[in-house]
Image (cartoon, rainbow, N blue to C red):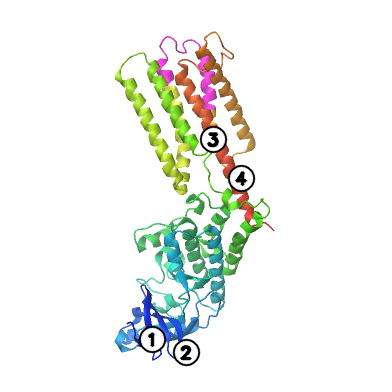
């Protein structure tokens, strides 16, 4: 089609893009000598009375949407039919805007929270104008949002989705067998064939979710899978995908993605105001926090820095070597060496997995939910195995069962407190945990003193029983695990409180 003249006026220069409806070209308006964008709706080309009716309906719809005049809506200059050589496909002539589609920015992954809030608010302003004129978009998605070279939004294709629907009538959007819109962004009521203005807000919620997390709220292999998910599944919170997303974003997006339209924001203007607050709040807080961005405080920085995992790994390796060398079970065989090698292998795998998860915050958050219970159970399993393996041997806990009971209760309680810690855990629970840390630390010190000099015993009734290397090591790791989790969950609680106040700063 290059160099063709459409409508006796628009010379096609180069193709800018292609989609399911047709092609977009840069063209030269030979009457006014200016550059324009021409969208040829090849989907409606062809012969027959039905095709002619569809083109006539498209032109009627296009005239309605061409009346929309707004800074964030691409201006429609003209419309017409391309001629018999192109199947009489209708075309729209629009302003030519410099910039790129939001889909291209998403593909590069360079969208910040501030940009998502600002662009989302501008999309809402465009929707507000269109809804006031009785026009719904029906196909809000990244490829229909254009970011200009100045950073402003231009929304494309208002009303085009309805205009190309071969079954559209005045009182019914579609009939069974034809879907208007894009399934990954489609509201449940729109999937059923009954859209309303708040259907555009649902699609915006999907778009915002994708902007700030890098993925859609639902994953499916095909269009049917997406529609089923929108109709029946609850979307995840964006912060479960990325740990640095403030909770204020969760509330806004999850409200947009409600199944019942009545539970969403009432108008696009309401969403715009909420997004403007999200966009402006970080700057306001910045002036009150000694120029430290609140968004940076929500990022999950590993407690202890990068050296701590290596230190824990080294401690496990050394402790394993000690346990193998002292031959806990009293039998000299290859099983001790094999057990030690297994322990070192598992510790190394954990260390590698730790650094892999650091680069994937969303997965790290999911793994943490599991490991908060698995690690305490694992430590208690090691402790119990050592006790069971030496119960009947000389030098074991023997008749001093109360010592075993006290040290075991102290250790189990500390492990339980470590597993129970969350960002919502109260101050007194944390203090009780540190009291158990102190108790176990005293028992560890007493056990160490006893191990070095059997004549020294500070608190003989709470010390860990023999063999001390096998019972003290789980206690030391439990103390470290509680302290790390307490600091990490307290940081997360502080970040959550900060993000909750971001949108309410006067």
Q: Nearer the viewer, mark 3 or mark 2?
A: 2
Q: Does residue 120 belong to the magenta stretch? A: no
Q: Is residue 482 above or below residue 473?
A: below
Give the camera-side residue of 474 and 160.
Answer: 474
Residue 305 location in percent, x, y? 52, 39
Residue 424 location in percent, x, y? 59, 42
Q: Which residue is mark 4?
A: 494
* Lower sequence index among marks 1 and 3: 1
Q: Is residue 223 above or below residue 408?
A: below
Give the camera-side residue of 13 and 466.
Answer: 13
Q: Secondary structure at mark 4?
A: helix
Q: Secondary structure at mark 3?
A: helix
Instruction: Give the side of residue 77 with respect to residue 500, left or right.
Output: left
Decide: few, some or many residues near mark 4? Use Cα within 10 Å; few <14, some 14-19, many ≥20. some
Task: Give the alpha-carbon distance from disc 4 to disc 1, as whole Å.
Answer: 60 Å
Q: Secondary structure at mark 1?
A: strand
Q: Which residues are magenta?
A: 386-413
Residue 133 location in percent, x, y? 55, 79
- Give yes or no for contact between labels 1 and 2 (Cβ–Cβ under 8 Å): no
- Give yes or no for contact between labels 4 and 2 (Cβ–Cβ under 8 Å): no
Q: Which residue is mark 3?
A: 484
Instruction: Give the side of residue 326 with respect to residue 285, left or right.
Output: left
Q: Secondary structure at mark 2?
A: loop
Task: Give the alpha-carbon distance from disc 1 to disc 3, as whole Å.
Answer: 67 Å
Give the camera-side residue of 323 and 427.
Answer: 323
């Amino acid at each position: 089609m290059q160099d063709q003249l459409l409508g006796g006026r628009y010379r096609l220069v180069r193709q800018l893009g292609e989609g399911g409806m047709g092609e977009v070209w840069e063209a030269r308006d030979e009457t006014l000598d200016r550059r324009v964008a021409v969208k040829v709706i090849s989907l409606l080309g062809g012969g027959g009375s039905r095709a002619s009716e569809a083109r006539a309906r498209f032109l009627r719809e296009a005239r309605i949407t061409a009346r929309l005049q707004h800074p964030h809506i691409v201006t429609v200059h003209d419309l017409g039919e391309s001629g018999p050589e192109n199947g009489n496909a209708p075309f729209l002539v629009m302003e030519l805007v410099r910039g790129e589609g939001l889909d291209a920015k998403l593909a590069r992954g360079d969208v910040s929270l501030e940009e998502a809030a600002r662009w989302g608010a501008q999309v809402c302003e465009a929707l507000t104008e269109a809804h006031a004129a009785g026009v719904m978009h029906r196909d809000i998605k990244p490829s229909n949002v254009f970011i200009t070279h100045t950073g402003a939004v231009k929304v494309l294709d208002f009303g085009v989705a309805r205009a190309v629907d071969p079954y559209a009538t005045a009182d019914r959007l579609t009939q069974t067998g034809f879907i208007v819109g894009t399934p990954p962004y489609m509201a449940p009521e729109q999937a059923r064939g009954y859209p309303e203005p708040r259907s555009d807000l649902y699609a915006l919620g999907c778009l915002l979710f994708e902007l700030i997390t890098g993925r859609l709220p639902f994953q499916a292999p095909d269009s049917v899978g997406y529609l089923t998910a929108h109709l029946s599944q609850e979307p995840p919170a964006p912060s479960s995908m990325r740990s640095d997303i403030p909770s204020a974003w969760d509330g806004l997006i999850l409200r947009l993605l409600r199944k019942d339209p009545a539970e969403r924001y009432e108008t696009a203007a309401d969403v715009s105001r909420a997004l403007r607050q999200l966009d402006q709040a970080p700057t306001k807080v910045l002036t009150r926090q000694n120029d430290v961005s609140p968004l940076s405080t929500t990022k999950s920085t590993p407690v202890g820095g990068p050296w701590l995992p290596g230190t824990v790994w080294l401690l496990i390796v050394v402790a394993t070597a000690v346990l193998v060398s002292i031959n806990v079970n009293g039998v000299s065989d290859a099983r001790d060496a094999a057990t030690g090698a297994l322990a070192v292998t598992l510790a190394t795998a954990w260390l590698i997995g730790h650094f892999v998860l650091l680069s994937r915050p969303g997965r790290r958050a999911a793994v943490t939910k599991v490991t908060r219970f698995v690690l305490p159970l694992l430590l208690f399993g090691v402790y119990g195995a050592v006790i069971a393996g030496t119960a009947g041997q000389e030098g074991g806990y023997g008749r001093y069962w109360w010592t075993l009971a006290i040290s075991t209760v102290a250790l189990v309680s500390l492990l339980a407190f470590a597993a129970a810690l969350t960002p919502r855990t109260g101050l007194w629970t944390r203090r009780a945990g540190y009291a158990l840390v102190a108790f176990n630390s005293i028992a560890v010190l007493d056990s160490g003193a006893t191990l070095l000099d059997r004549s020294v015993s500070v608190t003989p009734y709470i010390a860990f029983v023999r063999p001390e290397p096998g019972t003290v090591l789980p206690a030391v790791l439990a103390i470290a695990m509680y302290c790390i989790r307490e600091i990490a969950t307290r940081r997360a609680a502080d970040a959550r409180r900060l993000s909750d106040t971001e949108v309410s700063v006067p």
